[in-house]
Amino acid sequence: MKSMFSDGPVRTGRIVLFPLLALVLLAAGCSPSVRTVRFKVNSEPEGAHVVYRVQGGGLPCQGQWIYLGNTPLRSVRQFSDEQLEGISRITLKVMRRGYFDQVREWDGPSFLEEAEGRGVLFWTPELIPQPAGE
C-alpha cells in the first residue's frame, strides 16, 4: 500500500497550492472596497446639462465641476471607501439655457446611504423658466 506522502509530484503540487491560495485570499482581503454609484437624472424639460462636484476626500479633480452629460442621463461612477470617508460634500447641478439652475447636495454619509438604499441616485428637477431679460 502506498502512502499519500510517498508520491512526490502530488505532494509538491499541494505545497505550492496552499501558499498560492493563502496569497490570493490575503490580497482580496487587503484590497480597498470600491462602491459603484449609479446616477439617473431626468429634467423637465429634457436636454439639460448635468455636472457634479466633489469637495473633500482624495479624489482627482476635487472641487472642479465634472460634466456627466445631458438629461435624461444614466451614469455610473466608482468611489473607494477611503474616498467616500473624506468627502465633505457632493453637488449635482442641472443647467439649461433660459432656465434657473437646479442644485442638489449631499454630505459623504448621506450620499452613500441614498445610493446604497435605493441602488441608484434618482433626481428629476422641474426647471423654472427665467424671465426674459435675465
Image (cartoon, rainbow, N blue to C red):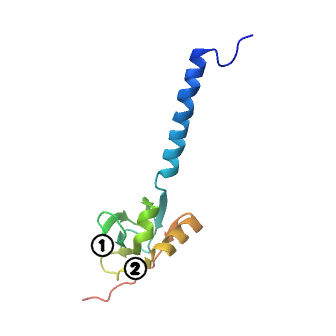
Report crowding for label 2: few under 14, some 14 to 19, many 20 or more residues within 10 A (C-alpha).
some
Q: Is residue 1 left or right of residue 119?
A: right
The single residue placed furthest to the top in the displayed view is 1
* Foreground pick, 86 / 110: 86
Which residue is found at the position 55% from the left and 21% from the top? 12
Which residue is found at the position 50% from the left and 40% from the top? 23
* Foreground pick, 76 / 50: 76
Report crowding for label 1: few under 14, some 14 to 19, many 20 or more residues within 10 A (C-alpha).
some
Amino acid type of the residue tagged 1 in the rendering:
Gly
Which residue is found at the position 44% from the left and 60% from the top? 80
Q: How many marks?
A: 2
> Does 39 sit above or below residue 94?
above
Question: Element type at marker 1?
Answer: loop
- Mark 1 highlights which residue? 63
From the top left corner, tell me how far across and down residue 133 is, in percent: 24, 89
- Mark 2 highlights which residue? 103
The single residue placed furthest to the left in the displayed view is 133
Disc nearer the start of the sequence (1/2): 1
**Distance between the alpha carbons at the discs numbered 1 and 2:** 15 Å
